């Protein structure tokens, strides 16, 4: 077994995660966590859809922000994809997608305030970076032969329209639709920083202990996501796109003086602002590094590694739930429901709920990340096993699982897991806003203390960390010869 | 003027020489059949000629190069994208003009696939796909034809029809063929390729099928 590089890599990551458990804070600190959890489930089971009229508005805003943000992101992402072979473009895209939607929202909130533009840009900017990368990969994979056959005088645009786009159109459309679902999740969690989407109402009903209201919101959100194939139709899309900007709400007007001040004063490191020169700057940077960045990086990395392995274990446990090789149709349906709920609940909302119930520690974050990401990977792997035909006399039960299926899907399982490594780290950093001591915690505190210069430095550090993990993940996938399509 | 003469044609795959060095002169009016074992270098030679002719030829490659998502009409229309302004091409992508529909339709009729004009290339059979690539080459109407096994997936009557259409329309052509009888029937000159070099070069009228079989 140990001679397989995939097994060695898995064991190495497992060992790192176990070591991480010894240094991580994974205590449950609330007095009565299980009673709270029970009350929450009772709340979900007895949803109250009529408590506030704000609920429907929030749902509408969530959809509107999602549509406008993803549409702008895909438009600019497509333009960027056309010039993606240029190194500066690639670096720029890697940078804007390494910063989480919520961080973008926190930045824009400081100078645009609660204007719709804040929410739209917070989604559109990181999504443009992701779209650029994936679109360019799709375009690159299109068959080059047809364009080689065109007569020499053909314009580049005509050649692109006839010989490239049709070949990848289906893939582009599928991926964009898939990102739209991700965009709705992003839009929902923007509410946690004060925009008028679902997260805002979820947070306020939760903090008042109104679990039935929170339950109603979650159920509506699942219904919204699950019915997407019904209400998102190609023919209706233009209508949605035209209407969406009008449903973003008014917000508050932009004060342009704030915008100017933010860029010319707020984010300039304070020693430079106060004329303390380079000496002042280096001691200031040292202070940021030691008191905030390094502890933040440490906690982010530890939590990421634990969550990554927990995600892997959960996916391996969960995929039989929807695999035709194990369960009858009834159990397979309930497995589907569990995985759909696990993957369509944004990890941020899961973490928020578990934090409220169990108190602040790394445990709720690990469970939330593992449930969400494990749900996604488990679903993909389970679906993959359904394409496998076993010989008629194949063993059943655990032997079938361990001898027939896991070896067959293990490589693609690892591919998905390493693909999501960077996503898990991005989420881990952001969960700090909820009070876990990852990088997001320090960013959020710096913003609360009106130290935007510190916040910007910390966001840049977070982005570099994400880019680093992305590069490392790609290196490992290449080393182990693992291939995968993007997931979000 | 549509003949050509190229010296020092050569191609390697890694450090293995696949073609050449060889010289090939083709005069206007000649229909040249390239024959030889598979792997002898015929396809590579066709590709080399296409590059040297700076794409100024109608090409039917072995892989056909169809855009699978587009209907047959658009795959054929692509042969004349250089003849129209961008707005015309873009509009045609959405809704073709009657004039072009008729021209392309007539061409497809000649190849007996006019019923497939609006079918995406992806859902055609191998023989139909081959005829679409041939229709595109005919529609492009360059002076020279370069074709790599253009009748490999066609039944005999259809193969005759296609070979006749190709040699009628193009005054000059270089066609890689594995069917020796077809080569003798429709081409005026036979060039045999062996291990990347020219091993035989004779007018078709002076050759028998048995003379060519020596190459195999």
Image: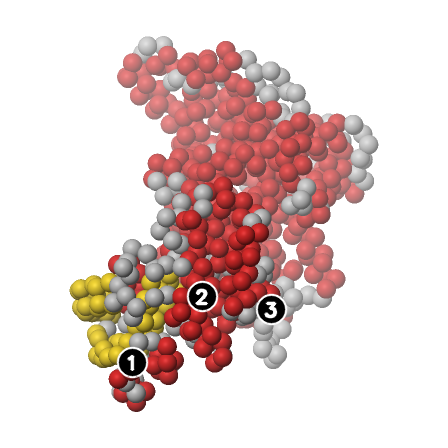
Which residue lies at the image location 31% right of the left edge and 16% below the top edge?
A: A280
Quadrant where the image shows the N terminus of chain B: bottom left
Q: Position of residue A39 (x, y in %)?
A: 75, 38
Q: Position of residue A355 (x, y in %)?
A: 62, 36
Seen in the image, is B156 located left or right of residue A322?
left
Inter-mark Cα distance, 2 to 1: 24 Å
> Is label 2 or label 3 in front?
2
Question: Looking at the image, is mark 2 or mark 1 earlier in the sequence?
Answer: 2
User: What kind of element bears circle 3?
Assistant: helix
> Is label 3 or label 1 in front?
1
- Marks 2 and 1: CB-CB under 8 Å? no
- Crowding at label 1, few (<14), some or many (≥20) Cα neighbours within 10 Å? many
> Is label 2 or label 1 in front?
1
Q: Position of residue A113 (x, y in %)?
A: 57, 19
- Marks 3 and 1: CB-CB under 8 Å? no
Q: Are marks 2 and 3 on the same chain?
A: no
Image disc number at residue B204 = 1
- Crowding at label 2, few (<14), some or many (≥20) Cα neighbours within 10 Å? many
- Crowding at label 3, few (<14), some or many (≥20) Cα neighbours within 10 Å? few
User: Which residue carries the number 3 mark?
Assistant: A398
User: What kind of element bears circle 2?
Assistant: helix
User: Which residue carries the number 2 mark?
Assistant: B134
Seen in the image, is A36 located left or right of residue A362?
right
Q: Quadrant of residue B136?
A: bottom left
Inter-mark Cα distance, 2 to 3: 56 Å
Residue B187 appears in the picture as rendered:
yes
Q: Is residue B109 above or below residue A448?
A: below
Q: Position of residue A45 (x, y in %)?
A: 79, 43
User: What kind of element bears circle 1?
Assistant: helix
Image disc number at residue A274 = none
């Amino acid at each position: 077994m140990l001679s397989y590089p995939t097994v060695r890599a898995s064991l190495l990551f497992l060992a790192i995660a176990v070591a991480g458990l010894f240094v991580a804070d994974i205590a449950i600190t609330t007095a009565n966590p299980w009673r709270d959890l029970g009350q929450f489930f009772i709340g979900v089971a007895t949803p109250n859809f009529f408590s506030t009229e704000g609920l429907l508005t929030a749902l509408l805003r969530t959809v509107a922000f999602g549509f406008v943000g993803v549409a702008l992101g895909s438009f600019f992402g497509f333009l960027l994809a056309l010039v993606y072979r240029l190194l500066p473009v690639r670096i720029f895209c890697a940078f804007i997608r390494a910063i989480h939607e919520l961080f973008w929202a926190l930045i824009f909130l400081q100078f645009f305030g609660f204007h719709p533009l804040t929410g739209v840009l917070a989604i559109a900017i990181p999504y443009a970076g992701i779209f650029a990368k994936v679109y360019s990969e799709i375009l690159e994979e299109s068959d080059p032969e047809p364009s080689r056959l065109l007569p020499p005088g053909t314009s580049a645009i005509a050649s692109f329209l006839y010989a490239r786009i049709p070949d990848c159109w289906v893939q582009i459309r599928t991926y964009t639709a898939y990102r739209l679902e991700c965009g709705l999740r992003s839009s929902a969690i923007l509410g946690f920083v004060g925009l008028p989407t679902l997260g805002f109402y979820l947070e306020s009903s939760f903090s008042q202990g109104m679990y039935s209201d929170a339950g109603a919101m979650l159920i509506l959100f699942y219904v919204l996501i699950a019915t997407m194939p019904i209400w998102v139709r190609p023919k209706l899309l233009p209508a949605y796109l035209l209407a969406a900007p009008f449903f973003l709400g008014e917000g508050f007007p932009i004060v342009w003086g704030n915008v100017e001040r933010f860029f010319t004063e707020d984010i300039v490191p304070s020693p430079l602002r106060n004329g303390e020169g380079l000496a002042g700057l280096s001691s200031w940077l040292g202070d940021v590094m030691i008191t905030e960045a390094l502890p933040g990086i440490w906690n982010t990395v530890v939590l990421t590694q634990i969550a990554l392995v927990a995600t892997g274990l959960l996916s391996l446990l969960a995929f039989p739930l929807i695999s035709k090789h194990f369960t009858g149709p009834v159990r397979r349906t309930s497995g589907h429901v569990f995985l759909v709920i696990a993957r369509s609940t944004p990890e941020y909302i899961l973490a928020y709920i578990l934090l409220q119930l169990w108190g602040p520690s790394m445990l709720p974050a690990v469970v939330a990340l593992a449930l969400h990401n494990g749900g996604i990977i488990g679903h993909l792997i389970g679906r993959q096993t359904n394409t496998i035909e076993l010989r008629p006399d194949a063993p059943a039960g655990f032997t079938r699982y361990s001898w027939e299926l896991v070896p067959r899907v293990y490589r693609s399982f690892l591919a998905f897991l390493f693909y999501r490594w960077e996503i898990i780290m991005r989420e881990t950093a952001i969960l700090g806003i909820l009070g876990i001591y990852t990088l997001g915690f320090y960013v959020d505190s710096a913003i609360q203390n009106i130290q935007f210069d510190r916040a910007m430095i910390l966001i840049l550090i977070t982005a570099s960390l994400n880019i680093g993990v992305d590069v490392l993940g790609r290196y490992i996938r290449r080393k182990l010869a693992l291939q995968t399509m993007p997931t979000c | 003027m549509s003949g050509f003469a190229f010296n020092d044609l050569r191609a390697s795959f890694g450090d293995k020489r696949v073609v050449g060095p060889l010289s090939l002169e083709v005069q206007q009016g000649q229909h040249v059949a390239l024959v030889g074992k598979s792997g002898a270098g015929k396809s590579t030679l066709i590709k080399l000629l296409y590059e040297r002719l700076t794409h100024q030829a109608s090409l039917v490659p072995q892989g056909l190069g169809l855009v699978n998502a587009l209907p047959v009409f658009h795959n054929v229309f692509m042969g004349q994208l250089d003849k129209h302004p961008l707005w015309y091409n873009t509009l045609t992508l959405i809704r073709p003009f009657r004039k072009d529909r008729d021209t392309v339709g007539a061409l497809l009729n000649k190849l007996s696939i006019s019923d497939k004009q609006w079918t995406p290339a992806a859902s055609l059979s191998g023989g139909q796909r081959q005829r679409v690539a041939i229709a595109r080459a005919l529609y492009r109407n360059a002076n020279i034809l370069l074709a790599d096994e253009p009748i490999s997936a066609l039944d005999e009557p259809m193969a005759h029809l296609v070979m006749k259409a190709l040699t009628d329309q193009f005054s000059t052509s270089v066609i890689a063929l594995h069917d020796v009888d077809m080569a003798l029937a429709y081409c005026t000159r036979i060039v045999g390729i062996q291990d990347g070099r020219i091993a035989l070069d004779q007018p078709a009228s002076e050759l028998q099928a048995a003379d060519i079989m020596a190459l195999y």
